Image: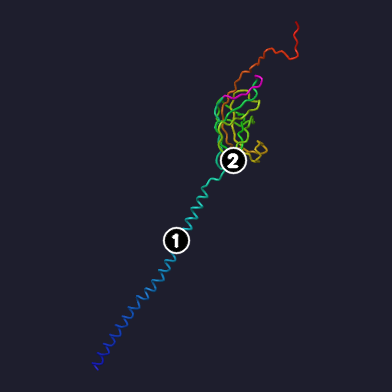
Amino acid sequence: MTRKTIVLAVVALLLAGTSAALAAGTGPTETSATDGVPMAQETTTAGGNQTTQTTTAETTAEGTAQTTQTPTGQATASVIFLNQSAGFSFTDGAPNTTTVTLERVVVPEGGFLVIHEARNVSGDYASAENVSVGPVVGNSTYLEPGVHSNVVVELDGSINDSQTLVAMPHLDTNDNQRYDFPEADDPYVMDGSPVVETAYVIVEYDVIDATFGEQTTANETTTA
């Protein structure tokens, strides 16, 4: 009985060792198989995340680029109007037209440069902030979109004395290249107010009396 018990115990130990070995052999296989699934999932997930992140980054970059672009026509109009002596043209010795010259005019969408009288002027050299805009006394021809230098504007006959004038760029809202304000062609605005600049224009001229020599007409006859 004792011998049989020992043999059975040995056999039991052998079987237990085999089971343990089998269990040990199965473990790595199952672990490897199990690890394989997460690895595949991680690869898929990583790939998905990369695609999503790339797409998001590209979309965001494109959206930002579109947002930061300045649409054509949104640039600000501007005028440089310097203090000056008026220009004149004469007919038969008398002043015919009076002109002023704008050193620089920027009209992003095209339009006109309009000259106004200044109202409520205190002092000769008043700034744009200190005057009110009076009636129109002259306007340029149509100006193409962009920057223009030495723009000459002919003034009407009401400007006979030295005074402050106001320059104001206007749009060509009806696209006919003719100045039609107030029916159309509103002024360029910035922060809700028209873009304006002032200058003091000196008007001084002497009327020149033209003197003509005596002339003899063709049908005159001379008698001895």
From the image, which quarter does the N terminus lie in?
Answer: bottom left
The amino acid marked with disc number 1 is Gln
Is disc 1 surrounded by few (<14), some (14 to 19) or many (20+) residues within 10 Å? few
Pinpoint residue 182: horizontal percent, then vertical percent.
66, 36
Q: State the residue in front, 127 or 58.
A: 58
Identify the main secondary structure in magenta: strand
Q: Which residue is mark 2?
A: 109
The span from disc 2 to disc 1 (Cα, nearest Å) is 45 Å
Q: Secondary structure at mark 2?
A: loop
Q: How does the figure colour the protein chain or chains?
A: rainbow
User: Earlier along the polypeptide chain: callout 2 or callout 1?
Assistant: 1
Q: Secondary structure at mark 1?
A: helix
Q: Is residue 51 above or below residue 193?
A: below
x and y percent of residue 47 in the render? Answer: 44, 63
Q: Position of residue 141 (x, y in %)?
A: 63, 34
Residue 135 is inside the magenta segment: no
Viewer-proximal residue among 159 and 73:
73
Relative to residue 46, is residue 16 drawn left or right?
left
Vertical order, 39 against 73 (above or below):
below
Q: Which residues are magenta?
A: 85-93
Residue at label 1? 50
On screen, 56 above or below 128?
below
Q: Residue at x 75, y 10 (%)?
A: 221
The quadrant in which residue 122 appears is top right
